[in-house]
Structure formats: C-alpha cells, structure tokens
Image (cartoon, helix red, strand yellow):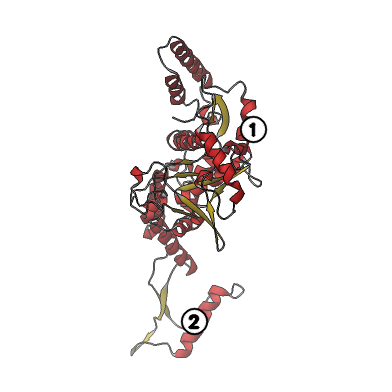
C-alpha cells in the first residue's frame, strides 16, 4: 500500500515536471551510507593517476574486465536454481541486458566498474516513467564521479537520519542537472575521514596509495630524462699539455666542438663522429644506466603494493621473471574468490534492491562458475554439490533448517551470487 501511495503522489506531481527540477521522489532507490561529499584527494588527481601511470590503468582494467564476465540469471528463491518461468520475468530486468542505446551489458559493466575503481564511487542512473517501478526502466547509464556533486542539507548526524535528503547534481558543460535520489544507484568505497560535510560519497583506494603513485611517476620521469639526454651527461675537456701545462681551448674551438656534438645528436644524416686535432678527455657527471638508480626496482615494488591494495595478484601481469601457467591459473582464481565475487555480491544486492525483488518469488543472481578456472574437477564438484543439495533439501523438508539457511549454504558453496 505504501508503494502504491508513493507512486500515486509521483504521478500526480508529474504535471509540474521540469527536466532541471524533477519531482521530489519517484521510483525506488538503493543507497549505501558509506562515505561523504568532500573528497580528500581531488577527482582530477585520481583521474591523472589512471591516465598517466601504466601500472594503475593495468590494475583497473584487469578488475573491470574480470567483473564484466559475470553471467546474470533469474533464479527461484525457493530452490536457488534457475526459475522455471524465468522467461516470464526477463522483461522486468531487460534494462540489465541492454542498458542503453550505445552500450551492451558487458561494455556497461566494464565502464561502471572502471569509474568505481578510479573514484571510489559508482553512480548508476536509471531512466523510467513517473509512477512506475524502476524495473520499468528504459535505460541505465553509469555517470563519472568527477561530474557528480552530492550534498546533504540536514545538519543532523547521519545516524539520526532515517530517510536522509541527498541531493545529486550532474555537471554537463556549464549546466548543472539535478537528479532525484530515487533514480540513482549509488555504490561507494569506505572512507575514514567522516564528518558533517563528508559522509555520503566514498573514497577511492587510490587515494590511500599516494606515495606509491608519486614514486612510480617520479621513477618514470627520471628514466625519461636519461633517455631524452642520450642516457649520459658529461664534460669534454682538453687533455693536451705543453711545457707550461694544460692547453686551454679558445672560443672558436669550443663553438666548433658544440656544433659537432649537436650534429651528432640531432642530424642523423651527418657523420656520427667528432674529428679534431685536440687531445680530449671525457668526465662523466651523470648516471647512464637507470638500473643503477634502482628505478626499475622502485616501480616494481610500488606496483606490488598497488596490487595488494586493489586485491589483484601480481602474477596476472607481465613480469621480467615470468610465471608458470599453474601460478597464473591459481592467481586468477584468487582474484575472483577474494576480490571480484565479494564486490559483485554488493553490486547484485544493489540491483535486487533497485528492482524490488524482495517481495518476489525470484531474484537476480550473478555467477562466474562458467569460467575455465572453476571447471576443474567438475565431475567431483558436481557429485559433491548434489550430495549437499540433497541433504539440504531433506533437512528443509523435515523442518530441520529454514529457507534462508538453505539459500545461505548455496551461496557459501559459490553456486549463486545474490543478496546475503
């Protein structure tokens, strides 16, 4: 009844709709109060880290691609298996299959995951008619966090607010577009500097890796400087002597030598050597080998720290030492089991809440069991699963366990990803 009244109010308010000032509420919403709106590190710095540091973009890209391999299904809450009439419900989640006019499901999931990894915030906008449930959405878009502004007008502490007023705005050019909270699925990372002005938006894991990012950037700049300067700097001096001592170069000889050096460096068509009657001596004043400065080792060590922070095993990336196929296989499995699947559970939970499946006999789940890394010993696993589900079914039938216990065990075995 409450949902009906809510939608009726939204429908009545439709006559005063202005694209720049939408009605106060319409549709459902899913909001996780895990962060704040004033970011410690600017969004631009985080974007620069992603765009300028190859190690950062490699980690973010790895997680986005892995996340996008999720298979979405509609399952029965009673059995935990694909609903017999799943096709009848497909139209209710069609926007998940075809998010918008320019992205497929895989493209959308890669983009929204990339935004989340860079900025620590994921804003998914759903477009659906007034007075209708969000499952009637015709499109969904992932909005970049650097163009979003979140404000909370109430001065009360967040724990005293039951249904907080959260105002979202999207900056497009010089125009700000207000977005109703009910049209936003806002997922975010945790932050530690929670205060009155800072408790809605999350904070990216990259914000806590500033030292590593700065070290890698400095190491690349130092390597670039050495390369740009032909790897070495020094002084050519006159080594000739006579009875009075060292013979000094006159100005004409100095200018001629500088011209010849310039020809060697920039004019490849000229003879790449200096011919002079002077006795010259070379005094090196710089390091000509980046390895002697520890630059490669510094980048490698900081990269390992970034991998640990992001939950991505370093064995999945290229290494001068190489890695075995077996190590890569287990590293990929660790990536999914320890990082991607737990993060996917939160995402699936948000989708179920947004599409209001709590009162339905079915729910949306995501699965990665189709991947090759989970196919080994499939026969043994199938036998084990059958034994477990048979035992659970008997226990459920006899009243020894409840339906939530049954579902919990299925998720614990990694068979489905849904709301915990």
Q: Which of marks 2 and 1 is in front?
A: 1
- Which residue is drawn at the image coordinates 42% and 44% (left, top)? 310
Q: Which quadrant holds the C terminus?
A: top left
The answer to which of marks 2 and 1 sits earlier in the sequence is 1
Picture coordinates of residue 393, whole percent (x, y): 48, 13
Q: In this view, does 342 lie above or below 182?
A: above
Which residue in the protein does label 1 denote? 91
* Secondary structure state at the residue bearing disc 2: helix
As rendered, which of 126 and 59 lies closer to the eye? 126
- The picture quadrant where one finds residue 42 is bottom left
Q: Which residue is drawn at the image coordinates 65% and 47% (left, top)? A: 102
Q: Which one is nearer the viewer's eye here, 377 or 324?
A: 377
Q: Residue at x 52, y 78 (%)?
A: 262
Marks 2 and 1, how far apart in space? 75 Å
Residue 61 visible in the shown view: no
Number of marks drawn: 2
Task: State the residue position of label 2.
Answer: 258
Residue at 50% across, 49% down = 115
Other residues around mark 1 within 10 Å, as few (<14) / some (14–19) / many (≥20): few
Q: Residue 86: horizontal and vertical position, in percent?
A: 61, 25
**Front residue of this view, candidates 266 and 33:** 33
Answer whether residue 302 is visible to the viewer in this image: yes
Instruction: From the top left corner, tell me how far across and down residue 127 is, in percent.
Output: 60, 45
Q: Which labelled disc corresponds to residue 324?
A: none
In the rendering, at what x and y percent does residue 371 appear? Answer: 55, 31
Residue 251 placement: quadrant:
bottom left
**Apparent side of residue 107 relative to residue 242 in the rendered image (left or right):** right
Decide: few, some or many residues near mark 2? Use Cα within 10 Å; few <14, some 14-19, many ≥20. few
Can you say whether 384 is above or below 310 in the image?
above
Task: Classify mark 1: helix, strand or loop.
Answer: helix
- The reply to whether dot 2 and dot 1 touch (C-beta < 8 Å) is no
Q: In which quarter of the image is residue 232?
A: bottom left
């Amino acid at each position: 009844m409450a949902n009906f009244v809510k939608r009726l109010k939204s429908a009545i308010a439709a006559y005063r709709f202005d694209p720049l000032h939408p009605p106060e509420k319409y549709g459902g919403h899913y909001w996780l109060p895990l962060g704040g709106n004033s970011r410690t590190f600017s969004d631009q710095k985080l974007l620069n880290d992603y765009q300028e540091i190859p190690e950062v973009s490699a980690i973010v890209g790895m997680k986005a691609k892995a996340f996008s391999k999720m298979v979405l299904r509609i399952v029965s809450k009673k059995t935990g298996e694909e609903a017999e009439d799943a096709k009848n419900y497909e139209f209710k989640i069609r926007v998940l299959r075809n998010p918008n006019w320019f992205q497929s499901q895989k493209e959308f999931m890669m983009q929204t995951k990339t935004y989340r990894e860079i900025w620590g915030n994921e804003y998914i906008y759903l477009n659906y008619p007034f007075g209708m449930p969000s499952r009637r959405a015709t499109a969904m878009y992932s909005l970049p966090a650097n163009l979003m502004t979140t404000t909370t007008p109430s001065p009360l502490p967040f724990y005293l607010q039951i249904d907080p007023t959260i105002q979202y705005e999207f900056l497009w050019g010089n125009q700000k577009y207000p977005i109703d909270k009910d049209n936003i699925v806002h997922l975010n990372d945790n932050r530690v500097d929670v205060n009155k002005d800072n408790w809605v938006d999350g904070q990216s894991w990259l914000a806590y890796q500033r030292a590593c990012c700065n070290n890698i950037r400095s190491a690349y700049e130092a390597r670039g400087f050495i390369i740009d300067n032909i790897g070495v700097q020094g002084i050519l001096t006159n080594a000739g002597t006579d009875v009075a001592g060292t013979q000094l170069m006159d100005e004409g000889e100095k200018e001629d030598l500088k011209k010849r050096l310039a020809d060697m460096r920039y004019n490849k068509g000229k003879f790449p050597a200096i011919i002079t009657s002077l006795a010259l001596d070379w005094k090196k004043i710089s390091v000509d080998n980046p390895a002697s400065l520890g630059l490669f080792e510094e980048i490698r060590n900081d990269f390992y720290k970034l991998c640990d922070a992001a939950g991505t095993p370093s064995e999945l990336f290229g290494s001068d030492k190489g890695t075995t196929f077996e190590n890569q296989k287990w590293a990929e499995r660790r990536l999914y089991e320890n990082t991607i699947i737990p993060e996917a559970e939160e995402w699936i939970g948000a989708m179920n809440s947004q599409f209001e499946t709590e009162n339905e006999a079915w729910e949306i789940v995501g699965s990665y069991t189709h991947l090759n890394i989970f196919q080994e010993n499939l026969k043994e696993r199938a036998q084990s699963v059958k034994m477990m589900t048979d035992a659970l079914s008997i226990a459920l039938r006899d009243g020894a366990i409840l339906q939530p216990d049954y579902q919990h065990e299925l998720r614990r075995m990694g068979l489905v990803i849904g709301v915990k």
